[in-house]
């Protein structure tokens, strides 16, 4: 039996970019992520660009979950290994539990395109009833990573919000 999801999920897209937050670089990944989410029926309620500073990221993620009550937060940027990349650490600090399958699926999809995907450290996790998903910062990689998991998000969010329908296919 297939589940039919009638709820519209509220999302936030948080771009982590030091240069982007200073207006020195155009954010191209954030708008793409927003476009992809909207095309799939999600409501993008909030979007913001901030510097890749761990305490600030933690503050925004916490606020968007605890106060704004977003169902999904997608971050883009800060998932590599440069000294200024802090997104996974900030995410890990605010979540209650990880969802490793999402990050594994994204890396697997990226690895089919480039060996450089081995450097991606993005994670996915749950805080309260919200999912936080880290994407790479480049437009191309962010789109490929989101595309890899987008079909699964609606089901996961349904279950995370307490949906109790059996969504599996019969044996």
Image (spheres, helix red, strand yellow):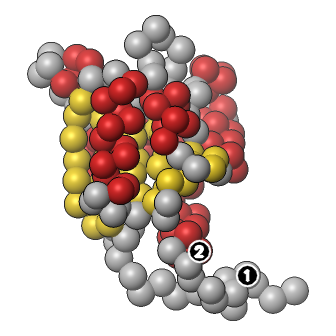
Q: Which residue is mark 1?
A: 168
Categorize mark 1 by other alpha carbons within 10 Å: few (<14), some (14-19), many (20+).
Answer: few
Measured from the top left, where is residue 121 in percent x and y? 58, 28
Q: Which residue is mark 2?
A: 159
On the rendered structure, is 34 left or right of 142? left
Secondary structure beneath label 2: helix
Q: Looking at the picture, does residue 126 appear above or below residue 93?
A: below
Q: Earlier in the sequence, mark 1 or mark 2?
A: 2
Quadrant hosting residue 27: top left
The one nearer the camera, 149 or 60, is 60
Quadrant hosting residue 59: top left
Q: How many marks?
A: 2
Measured from the top left, where is residue 149 in percent x and y? 56, 55
Secondary structure beneath label 1: loop
Q: Residue furthest left?
A: 23
C-alpha distance separating marks 1 and 2: 12 Å
- Residue sitting at x 37%, y 44%: 61
What quarter of the picture does the N terminus occupy?
bottom right
- Residue sitting at x 50%, y 60%: 128
Measured from the top left, where is residue 160 in percent x and y? 56, 69
Q: Looking at the picture, does residue 66 appear above or below residue 123?
A: below
Categorize mark 2 by other alpha carbons within 10 Å: few (<14), some (14-19), many (20+).
Answer: some
Residue 140 appears in the figure = no
For the residues labelled 1 and 2, say whether their Cβ atoms are less than 8 Å apart.
no
What quarter of the picture does the C terminus occupy?
bottom right
- Residue sitting at x 61%, y 20%: 119
Q: Residue furthest top?
A: 83
- Residue sitting at x 44%, y 19%: 85
Residue 136 appears in the figure = yes
On the rendered structure, is 138 left or right of 98? left
């Amino acid at each position: 039996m297939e589940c039919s999801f009638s709820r519209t999920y509220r999302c936030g897209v948080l771009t982590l970019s030091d240069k982007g937050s200073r207006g020195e670089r155009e954010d191209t990944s954030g708008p793409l992520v927003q476009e992809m989410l909207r095309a799939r029926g999600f409501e993008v309620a909030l979007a913001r660009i901030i510097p890749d500073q761990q305490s600030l990221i933690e503050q925004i993620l916490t606020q968007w979950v605890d106060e704004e009550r977003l169902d999904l937060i997608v971050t883009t940027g800060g998932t590599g290994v440069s000294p200024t990349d802090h997104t996974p650490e900030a995410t890990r600090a605010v979540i209650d539990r990880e969802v490793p399958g999402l990050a594994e699926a994204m890396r697997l999809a990226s690895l089919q395109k480039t060996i450089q995907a081995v450097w991606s450290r993005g994670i996915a996790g749950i805080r309260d009833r919200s999912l936080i998903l880290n994407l790479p910062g480049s437009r191309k990689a962010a789109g490929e990573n989101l595309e890899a998991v987008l079909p699964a998000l609606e089901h996961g969010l349904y279950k995370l919000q307490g949906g109790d329908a059996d969504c599996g296919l019969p044996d």
